[in-house]
Amino acid sequence: MTSPARDVALSGPALALRTCARRLAPLGATCAGAAAGGLAVELDGMGLEVDLSWFGPAGVGARPGSEAVIQAMSGLMRVHGRDAGGPRRIGLEVASVTSGILAAQAALAGMIGRARGIPVGTLQTSVLEAGLLLVSHRVAAATTGSEWVPVPPGPAPGPPFRSADDHWFEIETLDASAWRAFWERLGAGGADLQWAWRLFRPRYFRGTCTLPPGLHEAARSHPLVGVAAASDACGVSLSRVRSYDEVLEAPGFSAGHPVARALPAPPGAAAATFPAAAGAGALPLAGLRVVEATSRLQGPLAGRLLQLLGAHVVRVEPPGGDLSRSVPPAAGDDGTFFASFNRGKEPVELDLARPPARAELVDLIAGADVFLHNWRPGKAAEWGLEADDLANANPALVYVHGSGWGDLPGAPQMVGTDFLVQAYTGVAAGINAHGRPPLPSRALLTDYMGALMTCEAALSGLYLRARSGRGQRLGASLFAGAMALQAHVLEPLAGGREAGRRLGRPVWTVLDHPLATADGVLVVSLDRDDDLRRLCRACGVVTDGGSRTDVELRVAERLAGGVTADWEECIAAAGVACAAVCTDLAALPADPRLAGLFEPLGGTAWAPVAPWRFAS
């Protein structure tokens, strides 16, 4: 067997700890390796230890881990492959990067707690807990036993679509009439449009989207310039799925850190102070108050993360409540999508289109430490609720705006939603292997990453307020989240270096994909020089003769004839990272290895618990 050493990209706790250090660096933190899987963080004379592992408290023993194993165990492969009809691996180190960002958030929260007298000395998180966070609303839906009210399925996947000149593109609109006008302009027939909008519109909630083939045929009958002209005429946002070369050439590709600006201090304003801490054993943000006026996923999840760190969150909703409360399936009184990100918050209903209601919101903000919104650009100014407008009411306020595109130079004139951001930033290309179509992920990767950036912005603002005594204004975006997610690919690529990739896209062999067994699906990770030999011995495959591809095909054939659990046990015992792929999200909370990592949601569903643990 010809088996040269593989060029493997950085992953797991090593990538997570590097990500954590990079996220904290703009605040002046110094980070140094502690024990294996650990990081010592020091900031303004305060220090704490970050303990970051593959599996955290999961009951898997001392088995080796990998990004693919975490994606398999957490259900990420299941969510990502839903449109494809089976589990698919995500070609970016999404769980590893997310765990690093979560570690940075917890470290910032710990420093804020330390400044308030809460004795935080260590924090723990894991790559697995990060993976579970990224599927939280999908697990909640699955565990109700009824994920969605059925609608007639479309026979073809999509979007994205492909133009006559072979450009892949994404579209987005929140307007059914604009959607229909766009497709009619491209020549799609009425029969194809009968169900199309009802299939397209809820794809964020359903986690899948298949459309009539006539829409794809209509797209393929026009060059991209013609499709773009139709989208412009009808007010539909469109983005071509860009390559990494294009992303690197554009301004703003390295954006990923929230930018802080101190709020103007009214004359005679006293320096900002934190409320008294809640005492030993309290979470780091206990006693802090957040007012949140957000919708969809980015803002609500950011508020939920602040709540999990101890803050009290007041959620401002329109009269009658947020519309997503009624999106099925239900967990108790609310839909699982809403409950996943908003449970435990204090709801306040205000019609912000009315000046008296905006005055009530200002009164709420006057007593808050953080105000968080993700209104469309210009709405805060229109309502007189920009940071400067609120400085008199609360000079100590940390004001955070979560958006789609942020301050991206030459920001595209598109709505800032997940699939468009995936297309524009190259995520859709980077998550798929070299040579495969650049299809965005239904896992809502940039929505989740944008939420993490927005939470980080709030924590950075609180820390900077503690340091300077002044309120802060910060912004975060889905775009910044997408850039942070891809930093481990984009930065080496910009320097002419790649590991395990070609033009930024992963280069995978047979055994890098999920593998069918007699009763399920298995993943293995061959990240060390001798992993293939170990795997072959465990499977009883002869390695003499033939190329590496020949040997991998023999291993895949051998695995297909055995039981998943048996293979997982013997391969892990051989020291090779492997895992059964979760193909049923509803089964995750009952997995004994994941005991303690889920909590009840609304009495009928389950959701992941907080991804951190703190100790003095």
Image (cartoon, rainbow, N blue to C red):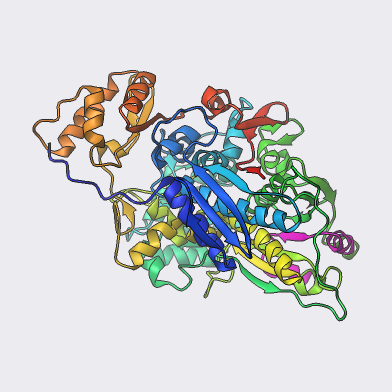
**Residue 301 in the figure: left or right of residue 568:** right
- Residue nearest the viewer, comparing 103 with 118: 118
* Of residues 339 and 225, the one drawn nearer to the viewer in this rendering: 339
Q: Is residue 248 visible?
A: yes
Q: Residue furthest right?
A: 356
The quadrant where residue 364 appears: bottom right
Quadrant location of residue 411? bottom right
Give left or right: position of 17 versus 515.
right
The quadrant of the rendering that contains the N terminus is top left
Residue extending furthest toward the bottom:
267
Please report the residue visible at 24 percent of the width from the left and 31 percent of the height from the top: 534
Percent position of residue 161, x then y: 42, 52
**Looking at the image, how many numbered discs can be counted on the residues?**
0
Write down the region rendered in magenta: 359-383
Residue 499: x, y in percent?
Answer: 30, 54
Q: Is residue 450 above or below residue 328?
A: below
Residue 205 among magenta residues: no
For residue 609, above or below residue 24: above
